[in-house]
Image (spheres, grey):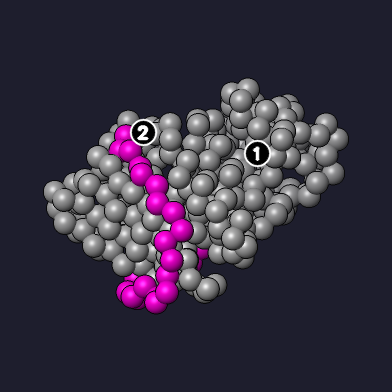
Amino acid sequence: MKLAEIRQLLEATLLAGTEFNESEVYCVCDADLVSDVLSLESLGSDGVLLLTSLIGPQLTTLISLTNIKAIVFVQGRQPGADFLQQAIKDGINCFSTPLAKYEAAGLLFQAGLPGTKRVKEKAEIVPQKAEDKLITIVEYPISGGDFLAAGHVTKKIKQRLENLGVHHKTVTRAAIAAYEAELNVIIHARCGKLQLKLSPNTVLIIVEDEGPGILDIDLAMQEGYSTAPQAVREMGYGAGMGLPNINRCADSLIMQSAVGVGTRLEISLRY
């Protein structure tokens, strides 16, 4: 379905992009929470339309981690001018519709545009020792509570992997896992750090924090389980999808946590 047809169907106003756009959209992602969007399997493909009411600063990070090239903001919502200017540079078409998300999604479904599917969850966390000859590429500090900086470390990791020539699918998986881990530090811990290590066939991301620790790891791995404060959830974070999303992206995940001390994640991706 062409973006021009979607604009007409939803009575949408163009905010950024091409006035008469013939670009094709093949599926719709309907979500307002960052982690919900990152759990969808189509994000590594082109032709994904995001239907959302999300207009906060996390939207910029979300777009940088995915291949979403078109966004429709519902209920007449509009992001700030800074985001729209960046969207134009990145070739992202942005629209605003007066319709509620329920109505807009229904019209798109009736028009034959399918929704995205969630990535199938792994059966279990598979512990695996880090491979030999891993070289530390870089290390970044993470400050707890600094939501304005959410995603900044991940962007640097993503850029570093791209510059090193790592396959783009591995880069996408690494970026999503790193973002969720970074965000967990910001939400729950006092401080932390992220290390990126590399071997000829493995990307290893190690995230350590000083924080409350995890009392029940099995419970924390369940989708939707969250200890994030309500104020954090109102910002679009803390949906209880962080650790499950990391596990989906990783080839192996080793997690260690001590209550009152902190948590350590070793996220390994083979390519």
Picture quadrant of residue 77: top right
Chain-order first, disc 1 or disc 2: 1
Q: Residue at x 70, y 54 (%)?
A: 46
For residue 146, the mark is: 2
**From the image, which quarter does the C terminus lie in?**
bottom right
* Magenta residue span: 117-146
**Residue at 83% of width from left, 31% of height from top?**
19
Compared with residue 236, is residue 66 higher up or lower down, i.e. above or below? Answer: below
Dot 1 amino acid type = Ile
Task: Locate residue 219 relative to residue 72 in the image: left or right.
Answer: left
- Residue 205 at what x, y percent from top left? 41, 60
Relative to the observer, which residue lies in front, 15 or 127? 127
Q: Disc 2 residue type?
A: Asp
Label 1, on which residue? 71
Image-based side of 227 in relation to 163, left or right:
left
Residue 116 rendering spot, x and y as whole percentages = 60, 55
